Image (cartoon, rainbow, N blue to C red):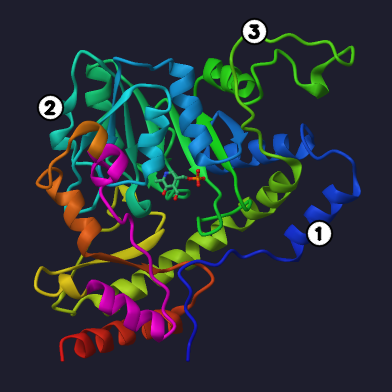
Amino acid sequence: MRNVPFGRPIIGAEEKAAVAEVLEGHILVHGPRAKQFEADFATFTGSPYAVSVSSCTAALHLSYFYLGTGPGDEVIVPAQTHNATAHAVELTGAKPVFVDAELRTGNMDLDQLEAAITPNTKAISLVHYLGLPVDMPKLMTIANKHNLFVVEDCALAIGGYVDGKHVGLFGDVGAYSFYPVKHMTTAEGGMLTTKHEDIATKITRQRAFGVDRHVGERKVPGVYDVNMLGFNYRLNEIASAIGIEQVKRMPGFLTARKANYEALQAGLQDIAEIDLFESSTDRIQSSYYCLSVVLKDDIAPLRFEIVNYLKAHGVGTSVYYPKAVPKLTYYREKYGYQESDYPNATRISEQSIALPVGPHLDQDDMAYIVATLKDALIEVTK
Ligand SMILES: Cc1ncc(COP(=O)(O)O)c(C=O)c1O
């Protein structure tokens, strides 16, 4: 039986040698690799500044911490995203105000965005869902009209572009994830990009306790001051060394993802029981995180039977995301959302199956996924 896992990090001899080199030295934190990784990631995305952090969640949390949101403030959050996008807001005491998804792409429905803005709104966050960028010029027109800070959650979107510009560079900050199944990995890790020097400078301090100079910057050992609050959200040298090698692989990773996605999309075209999201256009270039199929209403109750059939035949799947964030117990109970709220995000959560297109797979794997999904649909409706 073929084995087609949903995600599998590609760690080669280069990453292993880079890690060994770090371990043979004595600098595990505050070293040259984190700086190099930041410079390489900034170059790859075309971002003026990049700050390495311990996760995408840390990058998001630091963004609101920098902004100073707190009780009484509101931040717009897509209903269809990972809970981290909303948790980062909650952690500062501010309230996430959810906006439903559009069924066409799964991205936040920009036509519903303005109605969610109130005098208490301080920021808009968005996620480039499954790697397909939000129409950022359209979003920025609304954000600028209301003078709002914009946080782009790019956890699924490294290598996504709008009008030739990398995601994360339209808003005030971009937050990226290097979790193992993402476009590239450092085991755990993240990056924050920004075009504002003051944000980069302050967040660099806030990710490391708020000290005014880190170990390498101290002229006299042990002499430093703390002039702001901060966390320990640094990325260590081992992770950074892996990241440096992974960035080099990104062009190849993206080429493989695009080819896999296009093959899978072509193969799924004629399956009557499913709907497919729209993908890249002339202006909007996806980073092809995965390909989610949305089951039509009559077949949707059989979703987990289909998933189990795929699993039994070696095809790994996932769900992005298992529930619309406002329907997760924490948010539902805290803010009292109703069953009928956020119908589009709910539909996507309840009816979709995410299929893999990562660079660990090839065209034969895509053909196998198509054939196995077709078999699954026959089998579960027998
Ligand atoms: C959209 C989105 N944002 C944030 C995160 C959290 O990323 P991390 O695990 O790096 O904190 C994820 C994780 O999957 C995600 O999908």
* Sequence-wise first label, 2 or 1: 1
Q: Is residue 108 magenta?
A: no
Residue 227 is marked as 3
The magenta stretch is 303-332
Q: Residue at position x 32%, y 46% from top?
A: 81
Alpha carbon distance from label 3 to label 2: 39 Å
Q: Looking at mark 1, is its residue's CB closer than 8 Å to ligand 1?
A: no
SS for dot 2: helix
* Sequence-wise first label, 3 or 2: 2
Q: Where is residue 14 in the image (x, y as percent from the top left)?
A: 75, 60
Alpha carbon distance from label 2 to label 1: 53 Å
Q: Residue at position x 21%, y 75% from top?
A: 269
Quarter assignment of residue 85: top left
Position above or below: 107 against 208: below
Q: Where is residue 7 in the image (x, y as percent from the top left)?
A: 50, 66
Amino acid marked by disc 3: Asn
Please rate how many residues cluster around mark 2, counting C-alpha atoms within 10 Å: few if below 14, some from 14 to 19, many from 20: few
Q: Does the magenta stretch include residue 323?
A: yes
SS for dot 3: loop
Amino acid marked by disc 1: Ala
Q: Position of residue 201 (x, y in %)?
A: 60, 18
Residue located beneath label 1 in the image: 17
Identify the image quadrant of the C terminus: bottom left
The residue lying furthest to the front in this view is 333
Give the mark toward the camera: 2 or 1: 2
Please rate how many residues cluster around mark 1, counting C-alpha atoms within 10 Å: few if below 14, some from 14 to 19, many from 20: some
Q: In this view, does 281 lie to the left or right of 9?
A: left
Residue 115 is marked as 2
Quarter assignment of residue 295: bottom left
